Amino acid sequence: MKIAIAGAGKLGIKITEALLGGDHSITIIDKNEALLQKISSQFDLMTVAGNAKQISLLEDIGIDTYDYLIAATNSDEKNIVICTFAKTLGCKKVIARVRDPEHMNQLDFIKDTMSIDYIVNPDLSITMEIYKFLIEKYTLSNGIFSSGKIALIEFNTEKMPDVIGKNVYYVNESLGNMHVVSISRNGKVIIPKKTTEILKDDFLYVVGEKDRVLRLNERVHDKDKYTHLQKVMILGGGKTGLYLAQKLSEYGIAVKVIERDKTRCQYLSKHLNDVLILHGDATDIALLEEENIGEMDAVVTATGFDEENLLLALMAKKRGVEDVIAKVSRESYATLIESMGIDMALNPLDMTASHILRFIQGSKRVLSSQLIQGQAEMIEIRADDHMRLSNRPISQIGLPDGVVIAAIHRGTDVIIPNGDTEIKKDDRVIIISLLSEVPELEKLIKPGRMGFFQ
């Protein structure tokens, strides 16, 4: 497919990397010529220097021949206008990043009147994952996601203490027609190897035949355990802080937001009901202690700085807060997160790129998609003979460390694969992938020529 991306910022580059993995023809449009030169030296694509709002530029690149345009500049209004112009000029589908809270209650109207096919909001995506982590956990969600005869379940190892200290291979053997496909450990989702040791307080994600998973669910999920979420502190009153405070407050949670910018505090006070807004520096330990951070049921760090978010999360955890969640955009901090003991860390770029890719693919390849703690996704695809993962033993596919073939639904059979298993045409294949491995995942499921070097 031909895809144009307006805006060569972090999101534009992230999407580009993933789409090139899917063998698409990409054009990037940006005003910064030096940045475009750097990009063209790294990627096999076309770059265009200029303003994507200019109709003449869109006509010059032949936007009417493009399947998709993705507008990811730093301006909502510009993204909306670019999409509208591109669609009017004949681009088949257009996608806009829109972040301003003022637009959130009128997204459907914007889509309809401006002819935009899909709108993504990184801050809102993160908010929904945090909300699900906190609220669904406390409202007794059974933790099961199912697709046909295959299901995935998550649970804490305290529910199966006999697996603690054992390696994944041993645990899989004991589970029967189920296996551990990912582990959430100290706030980081990992794809385990057979030799990975299961530790105390790990959250295990197990995939298997649905009836077996349901029986396991009866064993590992208690009823009426989580009923006490009452107080949440949000450090940082940006867009994520605003969205999350609104959602939690509507649910009936007592929310405190600490924000250092006085003007922003005034804005939050006008737009949030029943939320305590505090003007102060979230890195001021004395202030946090004065506001009883140690008595919070959950703390979310969502300032504009990754370093602050990680340090504040660590501090909250040290003071005994049960659930601590951090917003972290840099993938280079991934190894730090695991050693810090926080409960969840979310990357808005990874999540947004995943949403855009799934929309572009539609139902052609990806049948369903489910995020796992905002860091990984479980997708279901229908295999064909032209995919790189088809017609060869899984051990020979060259799966990256962050991707695992979790299960195969073939006819009426559910197959828990091993290294010798081959994926056949029309198999429904469940794949677990870290969001950071999205570009590699696209290479696996893209259509291509047959042969060893496909």
Image: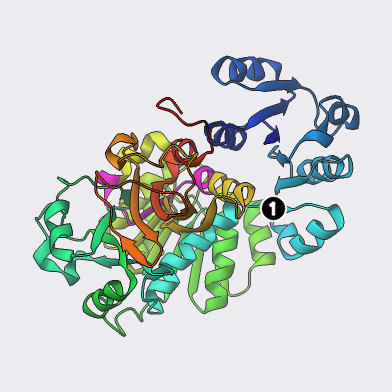
- 349 is within the stretch colored magenta: yes
- Position of the N terminus by quadrant: top right
Q: Where is residue 158 in the image (x, y as percent from the top left)?
A: 17, 68
- Residue 231 seen in this snapshot: no
Residue 386 rendering spot, x and y as whole percentages = 50, 39
State the image coordinates of residue 241 (x, y, percent, origin top left): 55, 58
Q: Mark 1 points at which residue?
A: 119
- Where residue 410 appears, as percent x and y from the top left, is 39, 60
Residue at x-position 31% and y-position 53%: 342
What span is colored magenta in the figure?
338-351
Does residue 71 appear in the picture of this structure? yes
Q: What residue type is labelled 1?
A: Ile
* Left or right: 112, with 310 as reference point: right
Which quarter of the figure has residue 88?
top right
The stretch drawn in magenta includes residue 370: no
Residue 14 versus residue 319: which sits nearer the camera?
14
**Left or right: where does residue 18 sit relative to residue 405?**
right
Q: Bin the neighbour count of mark 1 within 10 Å (Cα to Cα): few under 14, some 14-19, many 20 and up.
A: many
Query: Which residue lies most toward the bottom here?
Result: 224
Q: Residue at x 30, y 41 (%)?
A: 393
Which of the pair 240/191 is nearer the observer?
191
